[in-house]
Image (spheres, rainbow, N blue to C red):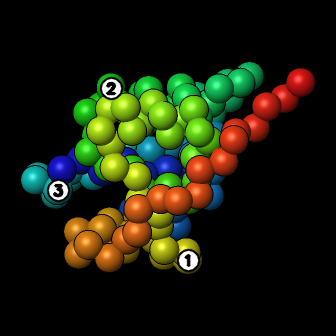
Amino acid sequence: MKIGIATIEKDLNQNVNPTFGRAPYFAVYNTTTKSVEFYENEAKNAQGGAGIKASQFLVDLNLDAIIAYRLGENAEKVLTSANIILYSPKENLTVQENIDLLLQNKLDTMVDIHSGYHHG
């Protein structure tokens, strides 16, 4: 299983980033190899549609799951159409602690989908 998580720094001991589309980095943890790769989020400075662009990037990495506090509805559609399962992290826990909880089936699936941020 490959799990994607928005991070503030390239460090599993940091808390999960509160934003998704504008997070500085994504950690991708591979449960088979127990390895992690960090990717810069190229969408973080997008004028608009950062969540959609970040979601498509993660879809292209063939992820199985995402851990995020919340997503916009368009980003959610991109991820779920690729059969990626969305989980909510536990607050004030590190990226690694949330990965461990997911592997123990102790994270809930995401319910906080918002309409997105539209600037006019």
Name which residue type carries label 3.
Thr
Is residue 13 in sight in this rendering? no
Q: Which residue is mark 3?
A: 31
Nearer to the camera, 120 or 38: 120
Q: Position of residue 1 (x, y in %)?
A: 18, 50
Q: Is residue 110 above or below residue 26?
A: below
Taking the spot 52% from the left edge, 59% from the top edge, the residue there is 111
Disc 3 from disc 2: Cα separation: 18 Å
Judge left or right: residue 34 versus residue 12: left
What is the secondary structure assignment of the residue under circle 2? Answer: helix
Q: Position of residue 70 (x, y in %)?
A: 58, 54
Disc 3 from disc 1: Cα separation: 23 Å
What is the secondary structure assignment of the residue under circle 3? Answer: loop
In the rendered structure, which disc, 3 or 1, sits on the residue that comes first in sequence? 3
Judge left or right: residue 84 versus residue 15: left
Name which residue type carries label 2.
Asp
In the rendered structure, which disc, 3 or 2, sits on the residue that comes first in sequence? 3
Q: Quadrant of residue 60?
A: top left
Q: Position of residue 73 (x, y in %)?
A: 59, 39
Q: Which residue is mark 2?
A: 60
Name which residue type carries label 1.
Asn
Q: Which residue is mark 1?
A: 92
Q: Is residue 44 above or below residue 34?
A: above
The residue carrying pointer 2 sits among few (fewer than 14), some (14 to 19) or many (20 or more) residues within 10 Å by Cα, namely: few
What is the secondary structure assignment of the residue under circle 1? Answer: loop
Taking the spot 34% from the left edge, 49% from the top edge, the residue there is 85
In the rendered structure, which disc, 2 or 1, sits on the residue that comes first in sequence? 2
| Marks 3 and 2 close (CB-CB < 8 Å) | no
Nearer to the camera, 40 or 46: 46
How many numbered dots are placed on residues in this image? 3
